Amino acid sequence: MARLNYNLIHQAHYVVKSALKGVRFMHEHFRSGKKEERILIHGDLKTDNLFIDASGIVKVADFGFSRVTGTNGRIAGKVGTAEYMAPELLDPGITSYDQKVDVWALGIIAYELMLGYTPFELTSEQEKSIRAVTRGKRE
């Protein structure tokens, strides 16, 4: 029976908890300058986009896919890295998403930090199919 690595679990907990605080701040405190509430959604959270600085502070980075929601709290289109994408992003019938996609990605990050791999390892063919679905095409 494999032994639990409590140090690894503690480190993963710290990283995920810190990233969650950053994402929560991003979701709750972004203001677009307009009267109505809008939310900033990262859209591509993954371990490659989390950094730890010299003093141990976790930073969320790479806001290249981030978008501000419309007044309905949703964003049209689909973005992200396939292994971290929420199920609704893979459904061709769903055309918009909300901040829950960031929460899903944080769950995948927690899994990966504790086990060393994502729960959904994809082949290049699966990746290609997912890319086709997110672009609204079928291959």
Image: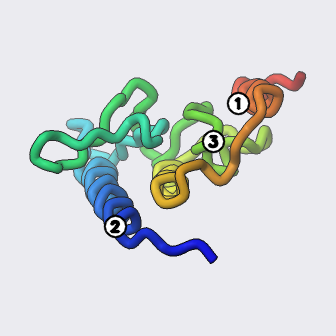
Q: Which mark is residue 83?
A: 3
SS at circle 2: helix
* Sequence order check, earlier mark of 2 and 3: 2
Q: Which mark is residue 7?
A: 2
Residue extending furthest toward the right: 139
Q: Nearer the viewer, mark 2 or mark 3?
A: 2
Q: Residue at x 64, y 36 (%)?
A: 82
Residue density around tag 2, few if under 14, some if 14–19, many if 20 or more, within 10 Å: few
User: Is there any visible trace of residue 69 in the rendered image?
Assistant: no
Q: Residue at x 77, y 33 (%)?
A: 123
* Sequence order check, earlier mark of 3 and 1: 3
SS at circle 1: helix
User: Given the image, on which type of amino acid does mark 2 rest?
Assistant: Asn
* Between 72 and 7, the one nearer to me in the picture: 7
Q: Quadrant of the N terminus?
A: bottom right
* Between 18 and 37, the one nearer to me in the picture: 18
* Sequence order check, earlier mark of 2 and 1: 2
Expressed as whole percent of the image width and height from the top left, the position of residue 52 reads: 23, 43
Gap between marks 2 and 1, in whole Å? 38 Å
Name the residue beneath numbered marker 1: 134
Gap between marks 3 and 1, in whole Å? 13 Å
109 vs 90, left or right, is: left
The colour scheme used here is rainbow
SS at circle 3: helix
Q: Nearer the viewer, mark 3 or mark 1?
A: 3
For residue 79, above or below residue 97: above
